[in-house]
Image: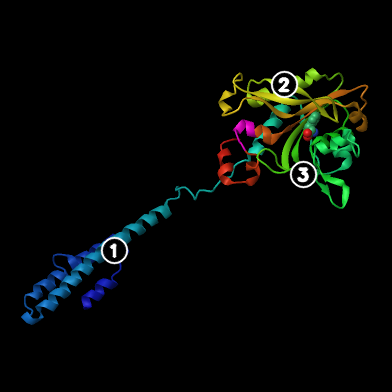
Amino acid sequence: KEQLERVEQFTADSKEAVEQFRIEFLGSKGTIKDLFTKFREVPAEQKKAFGQAINELKQKASDKLAQLKDQVEDSGQDQKLINDLTRPGNPIKVGSRHPISIVKNQMIDVFSRIGFNISEGPEIEDDWHNFTALNLPEHHPARDMQDTFFIQTDPDILLRTHTSSVQVRYMENNQPPIRTISPGRVFRNEAISARSHCIFHQVEGLYIDKGVSFADMKQTLLYFTEQMFGKSKIRLRPSYFPFTEPSAEIDIYWGLETETDYRITKGTGWLEIGGCGMVDPAVLTNCKIDPEEYSGFAFGMGVERIAMLLYQIGDIRMFFENDVRFLKQFSNAI
Ligand code: PHE
């Protein structure tokens, strides 16, 4: 009994101590061996109880030995790790850039290389900069082309529906030559679906100088698509915008004849990526630029649309849900 208690209470903090325990209890001259020797002298009627007691002690001592060995080994390991100053720290989860930022920055880079600067303006706009200056006076039917979020208490204040408003501000404050792009977030009161959202991003461009022509615009847009998508074919399809004349939709050919085939999983053909046109002289006049002296072109493109093409994303809503399983797929992009 007494020995059992000693076994149970034994602690060891080193290999040597464990070895000592082994020698004391289980060694060839140890306590248990002694007890077995005494066993022979025990009177017959006590033999059974005594035998059982020794066996129990032997079992406990072996278990304890195994346990002590484990303990000493573990703590030795821990100690080694703690002392190893070169071991790596705890990994920190690194975020990734949002695909819209990646593509927007790429678009900015492409235009910067041909001399466009970046202009920015407020997301909450007034009627003049978003509409009136752009040849969209009050009650103009084309205002309905862009469903607008108005501030309830003041119909003059709204969420910009395009970044053309930034270009108005830029023209008001700068004389030609002007080469500027306006990236930014815009808002339209539209039903949310896989193809459209009430919030999205645009990069609009403006180029004003002496003798700027439609051909200059087409070449600039072709340069852009080739930088973004590789060898491209584009088409300017006649359209209407109040602030440009003539106006066109920019379509890119998305199909087997281009070298971008590897990006295509399904569907080929012409796909619209934005609008463009020669700046209407009335807009220049509104912004204090003389249309007799200067001409220019403007264009606007949706960043989401271009990102969807580049990355084969089928649903615009994914950009706004911030599901990490979606976002972390872009962690390798710059
Ligand atoms: N502002 C237009 C839009 O948001 C795009 C555009 C810009 C069209 C410039 C022509 C010229 O729909």
Query: Does any atom of ligand 1 lie closer than 8 Å to the CB of label 2?
Result: no
In the image, the segment drawn in magenta is 308-314
Number of marks drawn:
3
Q: Quadrant of ligand 1?
A: top right
Left or right of 7: which side holds 236? right
| Amino acid at the residue labelled 3 | Asn
Would you say the residues marked 3 and 2 are in contact, meaning their CB atoms lie under 8 Å apart? no
Q: Nearer the viewer, residue 98 or 232?
A: 232
* Quadrant in which the N terminus appears: bottom left
Q: Nearer the viewer, residue 247 or 302?
A: 247
- Residue 200, quarter of the rendered image: top right
Residue 81 in sight in this render: yes
Q: Earlier in the sequence, mark 1 or mark 3?
A: 1
Residue 76 percent location from the top left of the image: 35, 57
At horizontal 74% and vertical 42% (from top left) the residue drawn is: 190
Query: Does any atom of ligand 1 lie closer than 8 Å to the CB of label 3?
Result: no
Residue 9 percent location from the top left of the image: 29, 73
Residue identifier under label 2:
235
Foreground mark, 2 or 1, reads 2
Residue identifier under label 1:
68
Q: Earlier in the sequence, mark 3 or mark 2?
A: 3
| Residue 69 vertical position relative to residue 7 in the rendered view, above or below | above
